[in-house]
Image: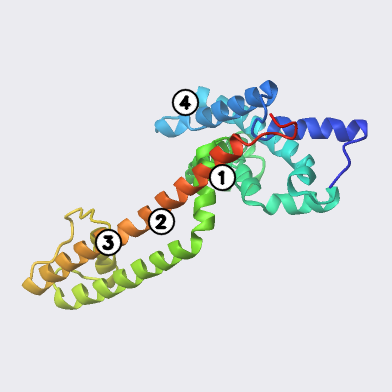
């Protein structure tokens, strides 16, 4: 980890404190957190309309520049976050999940650049036709997640309970395939493809049941009834695992928050 003794080191350490979620009543860091969250919300406004609004193009540019600066600040202070030498951190940080999310949230600016320079640069014409590139703005929401303590607790729960959740997910997938095979063979006229049967089994397992596909024979209806009952049980398992894990993590957080500091306070 880099030294914080030099002037440059102290400046970078202060930048790191600001761009990371606020700690110990750091008002400047808190203001930065709020600023980034607001920028994330503003970046999603263009997704609320199908019209090409000039104001939204401007916000795309402004927000993208903000995200680029935020990414660069995090990059030059990555050694403090990763606790690795500076040179090593510079190469490792872009491949972390948070950095990938940051990069995805920046990509929509390519649409704006393509509209301006697309006629001069052939490569950028591709982005002028790729309207779906706007959809990656949704990843900007994940930028805001780093500032939510509740989200951090839930992620910790998922991490700690991943083995149990993977077992439940495997059992659910197995049951979906078995149910799909059964209903696909007993309902040849209702389900034209096996994918239709898998779709029906999935919505039945989750007890959603949209009603666009449903069995019509007696055997098919029996399979559907059994699938619905098992669906309730399977869906309840991950919910109970996450709830129990969340309560444990919340208790740890509360206990840690009320721990006396080094001075005994």
Image mark for residue 53: 4
Q: Residues within 10 Å of mark 3 (few under 14, many from 20)?
A: few
Q: Nearer the viewer, residue 234 or 91?
A: 234
Residue 212 against residue 219 in the figure, above or below: above
Q: Quick one: which residue is furthest to the left in this view? A: 218
Q: Residues within 10 Å of mark 4 (few under 14, many from 20)?
A: few
Which SS class for mark 4?
loop
Q: Is residue 109 visible?
A: no
Confirm or deny contact between disc 2 and disc 3 (CB under 8 A): no
Mark 3 or 1 closer to N-term? 1
Q: Please provide percent x and percent y for residue 56.
A: 51, 26
Q: Is residue 94 left or right of residue 226?
A: right
Which SS class for mark 1?
helix
Q: Which residue is drawn at the image coordinates 18% and 56% (left, top)?
A: 212
Which SS class for mark 2?
helix
Q: Which label lies toward us, 3 or 4?
A: 3
- Residue wearing tag 1: 127
Q: Which label lies toward us, 2 or 1?
A: 2
Q: Which residue is drawn at the image coordinates 69% and 24% (left, top)?
A: 26
Residue 198 against residue 25 in the figure, above or below: below
Mark 2 or 1 closer to N-term? 1
Quadrant hosting residue 197? bottom left
Q: Is residue 142 left or right of residue 70?
A: left
- Residue wearing tag 2: 241
Mark 2 or 3 closer to N-term? 3
- Residue wearing tag 3: 233
């Amino acid at each position: 980890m880099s030294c914080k003794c030099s002037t440059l080191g102290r400046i970078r350490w202060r930048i790191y404190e600001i761009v990371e979620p606020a700690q110990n009543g750091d008002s400047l860091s808190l203001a930065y957190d709020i600023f980034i969250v607001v920028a994330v919300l503003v970046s999603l406004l263009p997704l609320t309309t199908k019209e090409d609004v000039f104001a939204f193009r401007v916000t795309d540019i402004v927000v993208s520049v903000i995200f680029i600066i935020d990414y660069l600040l995090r990059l030059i202070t990555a050694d403090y976050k990763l606790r690795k030498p500076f040179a090593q951190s510079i190469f490792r940080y872009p491949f972390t999940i948070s950095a990938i999310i940051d990069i995805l949230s920046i990509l929509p600016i390519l649409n704006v650049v393509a509209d301006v320079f697309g006629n001069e640069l052939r490569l950028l014409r591709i982005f002028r036709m790729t309207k779906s590139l706007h959809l990656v703005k949704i990843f900007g929401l994940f930028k805001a997640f780093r500032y939510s303590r509740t989200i951090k607790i839930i992620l910790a729960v998922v991490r700690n309970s991943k083995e149990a959740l993977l077992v439940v997910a495997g059992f659910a997938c197995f049951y979906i395939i078995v149910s799909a095979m059964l209903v696909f063979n007993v309902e040849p006229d209702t389900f034209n493809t096996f994918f239709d049967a898998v779709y029906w089994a999935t919505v039945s397992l989750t007890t959603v049941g949209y009603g666009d596909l449903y069995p019509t024979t007696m055997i098919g209806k029996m399979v559907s009834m059994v699938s619905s009952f098992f669906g309730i049980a399977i869906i309840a398992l991950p919910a109970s695992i996450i709830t129990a894990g969340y309560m444990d993590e919340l208790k740890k957080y509360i206990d840690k928050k009320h721990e006396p500091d080094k001075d005994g306070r």
